[in-house]
Image (cartoon, coloured by chain):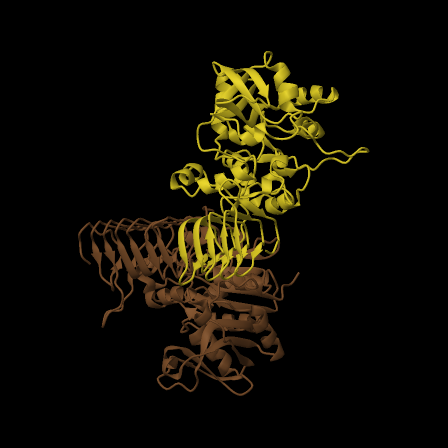
């Protein structure tokens, strides 16, 4: 029984620019938006778009991610035929290899894809926050009779040199690809989301693998080879919310944008496009009599006695009395003790911020950094953590960093 | 150490005490009454059983059970999707003369052949109007140690007024008892005694074979009630042991106690007492986190996910998906799932059922002794 389209989700990235947040965690497993992890977005998009078979390619620190995905039930991806499968590199009769690049990761799983005999394969990235209807993308791909399509976003021209750019004609046919060019000819940035006809993808993966000089990467190798052969390549315009949350600043910013769906365009309150996640199973959150909560998102298991302004609190966060939290992202199970001040920062899971400690600061003049505290860290009473700090070791009481 | 995985099976009576709380069970049954911002009453006893390795659980539904079927689904949220055992829902078996169960005996008699086929040594029986995070393994241990034939869980409290005043005292409604050295020596049905009593929690533990025997005999003699018609006449022949439960307990026996027991959970001590043990599972709705918008004012509230709060809320329990608009004031209320309070509305001492809408500018108040209940889908 053939599937029309299956998804391959690239989730092996280390996310090294997230430093302390990805020390023990693959980037797609990084918590986001109060009760989600980044990977909930592509997975929910798949199931909402009618894709019921997803291969997740993992390599870096996969434990949390594997446990989180489990049998795929929270995303309705526990299926008899298809469903979600975590695909780490594995040993074959011919030897074993880590995934050398994005294209090689798919190449090593050709036999997985062939089990489903799909007509199309969509390649997704596990490090973006985006609500996207892939069935609309597939419709475009079919209408254009394309062999390869890529989802693109218009970006401001001055930012274009930071992206991989698609140059396309008036029919959206791609004529050229520029990887982070100094002189951009286009402002259509690749979102790293591709639909391939499976026969074409397989042919180019095999050719790429045979080339010892290739970096085995979609952007650097596969797409240029398709262009070289004048394949039917099209650019699909996406104009919804899309954010690559590859840096501390962009991750913090995307979280803050969740607080303002009216302007930012990322609306998690969408009954027609739910984002699914594994549930914490905690009780409703509790806000005590002396607490102040303004303009924030709060989820199950939180206990608030202090002040929370313009912040996102994940499941089970405790804010003791006289603590102040502002413009902050506080991940699951963290405790902010009495009198602590936590501002403009990201606090990872299960952190303890000691009494009267100060973490981060609101931007002033030159300093606008987002302080970051890694998972499981304890910040001692009275310690002061500066606005640009990246903390991955416990900090003693009274210490300055 | 006994193998708790195979030692007991559970039987739950979700319709018990429906008659005490007619408003809330108009479209549902006791077991599916929403409680504590995101749960249904059955979640507590069901999770307690599942957490103790009781994974063969039968629900003896009687009437109004669609909401419960929807809530339980396959039992997955309680990890009760099992090849052996798992969750079984037994509706009344329609015979030539279809009649609904009255006491427990008819219900149990209808599943005797099922009970005979099971492998567990013990059976635990429970209603759903008691909110507890119960350790069944401790009770089973006590049962074994005391050599009991039947063990009954109880707590000490005054008999709730609503039970004493309940209509139809010809029914066998509630039970208190005298205890000597842990053994129940006298069992009282519908006692009107004042002061602290040993009040049955209607959680029973006995061997499966004994239950089958007792029910079989009682049923052929046309008996209806497990307590009045089986335990009471056998109180001297059987070793019926009392198992004292002194942890957190909420007993729902009318609208007032329903209101009070929800409100009690606004006290952190009570909330922690009920929830600090094993987790209580419930149906997942995949709501987003709750959003507090500029100008919202909240104090002393318990709120589930999926809400949008723009107005003022005080001393209230707010269920999933509730919207409280700008300028609205909510005080001392229980707002069930997807209640909408429109701009400028002011409400106090209200219990709104699911999907109730309070129109803009409305002013509605109950009192602390008589909270006003508004039924499902009403617009006021």
Give the residue at the far right of this rendering: B96
In this orientation, which residue lies closer to the viewer: A136 or B378?
B378
Q: Residue at x 64, y 29 (%)?
A: B118
Q: Quadrant of the C terminus of chain B?
A: bottom right
Is residue B173 shown above or below B376? above
Left or right? Give the position of A33 relative to A17. right
Chain letter tied to yellow: B
Q: Residue at x 45, y 46 (%)?
A: A282
Along the line of sight, the residue nearer the viewer: A182 or B59: B59
Residue A239 at x, y percent in the picture: 50, 76
Q: Is residue B82 visible?
A: no
Name the foreground residue: B233 vs A230.
B233
Q: Is residue A35 left or right of residue A386?
A: right
Counting from the top left corner in percent of width and height, residue B157 is at 48, 26
Asked if residue B364 can be seen in this view, the reply is yes
A251, above or below B353, in the image: below
Front-most of A85 and B260?
B260
Q: Is residue B211 above or below residue B72?
A: above
Residue farthest toward the top in the current orientation of the protein: B236
Badge count: 0
Chain letter for the brown part: A
Location of residue B164 with respect to A358 vertically, above or below: above
Where residue A39 appears, as percent x and y from the top left, is 46, 60
Q: Residue B166, located in which quarter of the rendered image?
A: top right
Residue B170 percent location from the top left of the image: 67, 25
């Amino acid at each position: 029984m053939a599937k029309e389209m299956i998804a391959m989700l690239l989730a092996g990235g280390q996310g090294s620019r997230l430093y302390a947040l990805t020390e023990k965690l693959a980037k797609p497993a990084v918590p986001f938006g109060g009760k989600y992890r980044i990977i909930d977005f592509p997975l929910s998009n798949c199931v909402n778009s009618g894709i019921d078979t997803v291969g997740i390619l993992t390599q870096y620190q996969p434990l949390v991610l594997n446990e989180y995905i489990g049998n795929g039930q929270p995303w309705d991806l526990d299926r008899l035929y298809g469903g979600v499968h975590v695909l780490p590199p594995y040993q074959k009769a011919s030897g074993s290899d880590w995934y050398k690049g994005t294209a090689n990761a798919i190449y090593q799983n050709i036999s997985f894809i062939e089990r489903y005999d799909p007509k199309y394969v969509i390649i997704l990235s596990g490090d973006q926050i985006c609500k996207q209807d892939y069935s609309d993308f597939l419709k475009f791909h079919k209408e254009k009779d394309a062999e390869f399509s890529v989802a693109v976003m218009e970006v401001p021209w001055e930012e274009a040199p930071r992206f991989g750019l698609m140059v396309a004609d008036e029919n959206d046919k791609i004529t050229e690809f520029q990887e982070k060019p100094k002189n951009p000819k286009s402002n259509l940035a690749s979102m790293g989301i591709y639909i391939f006809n499976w026969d074409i993808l397989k042919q180019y993966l095999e050719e790429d693998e045979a080339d010892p000089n290739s970096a085995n990467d979609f952007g650097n190798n596969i797409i240029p080879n398709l262009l070289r052969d004048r394949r039917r390549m099209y650019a699909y315009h996406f104009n919804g919310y899309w954010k690559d949350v590859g840096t501390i600043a962009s991750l913090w910013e995307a979280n803050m944008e969740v607080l303002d769906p009216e302007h930012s365009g990322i609306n998690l309150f969408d009954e027609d496009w739910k984002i699914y996640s594994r549930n914490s199973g905690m009780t409703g959150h509790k806000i005590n009599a002396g607490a102040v909560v303004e303009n924030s998102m709060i989820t199950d298991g939180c206990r608030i006695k202090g002040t929370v302004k313009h912040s996102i609190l994940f499941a089970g966060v405790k804010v003791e009395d006289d603590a102040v939290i502002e413009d902050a992202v506080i991940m699951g199970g963290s405790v902010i003790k009495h009198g602590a001040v936590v501002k403009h920062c990201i606090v990872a899971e299960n952190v303890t911020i000691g009494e009267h400690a100060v973490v981060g600061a609101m931007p002033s003049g030159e300093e606008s950094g987002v302080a970051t505290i890694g998972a499981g860290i304890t910040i001692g009473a009275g310690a002061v953590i500066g606005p640009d700090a990246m903390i991955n070791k416990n900090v003693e009481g009274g210490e300055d960093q | 150490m006994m193998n708790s995985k195979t030692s007991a099976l559970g039987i739950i009576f979700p319709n018990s005490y429906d008659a005490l709380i007619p408003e809330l069970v108009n479209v549902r049954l006791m077991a599916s009454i929403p409680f504590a911002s995101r749960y249904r009453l059955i979640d507590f006893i069901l999770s307690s059983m599942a957490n103790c390795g009781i994974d063969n659980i039968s629900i003896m539904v009687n009437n109004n059970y669609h909401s419960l079927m929807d809530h339980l689904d396959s039992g997955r949220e309680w990890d009760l999707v099992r090849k052996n055992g798992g969750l079984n829902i037994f509706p009344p078996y329609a015979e030539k003369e279809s009649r609904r169960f009255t006491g427990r005996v008819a219900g149990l008699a209808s599943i005797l052949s099922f009970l005979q086929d099971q492998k567990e040594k013990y059976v635990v029986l429970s209603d759903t109007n008691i909110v507890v995070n119960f350790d069944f393994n401790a009770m089973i241990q006590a049962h074994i140690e005391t050599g009991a034939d039947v063990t009954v869980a109880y707590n000490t409290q005054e008999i709730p007024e609503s039970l004493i005043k309940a209509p139809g005292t010809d029914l066998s409604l509630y039970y208190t008892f005298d205890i000597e050295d842990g053994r129940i020596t006298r069992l009282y049905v519908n006692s009107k005694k004042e002061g602290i009593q040993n009040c049955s929690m209607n959680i029973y533990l006995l061997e499966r074979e004994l239950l089958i025997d007792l029910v079989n005999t009682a049923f052929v003699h046309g008996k209806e009630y497990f307590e009045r018609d089986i335990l009471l006449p056998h109180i001297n022949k059987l070793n019926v042991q009392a198992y004292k439960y002194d942890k957190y307990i909420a007993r729902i026996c009318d609208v007032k106690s329903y209101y009070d027991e929800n409100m009690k959970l606004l006290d952190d001590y009570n909330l922690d007492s009920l929830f600090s043990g094993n987790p209580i599972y419930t149906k997942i709705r995949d709501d987003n986190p709750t959003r507090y918008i500029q100008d919202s004012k909240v104090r002393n509230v318990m709120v589930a996910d999926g809400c949008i709060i723009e107005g003022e809320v005080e001393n209230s329990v707010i269920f999933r998906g509730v919207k409280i608009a700008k300028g609205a004031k909510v005080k001392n209320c229980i707002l069930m799932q997807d209640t909408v309070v429109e701009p400028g509305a002011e409400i106090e001492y209200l219990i709104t059922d699911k999907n109730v809408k309070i129109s803009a500018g409305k002013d509605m108040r109950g009192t602390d002794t008589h909270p006003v209940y508004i039924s499902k889908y009403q617009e006021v």
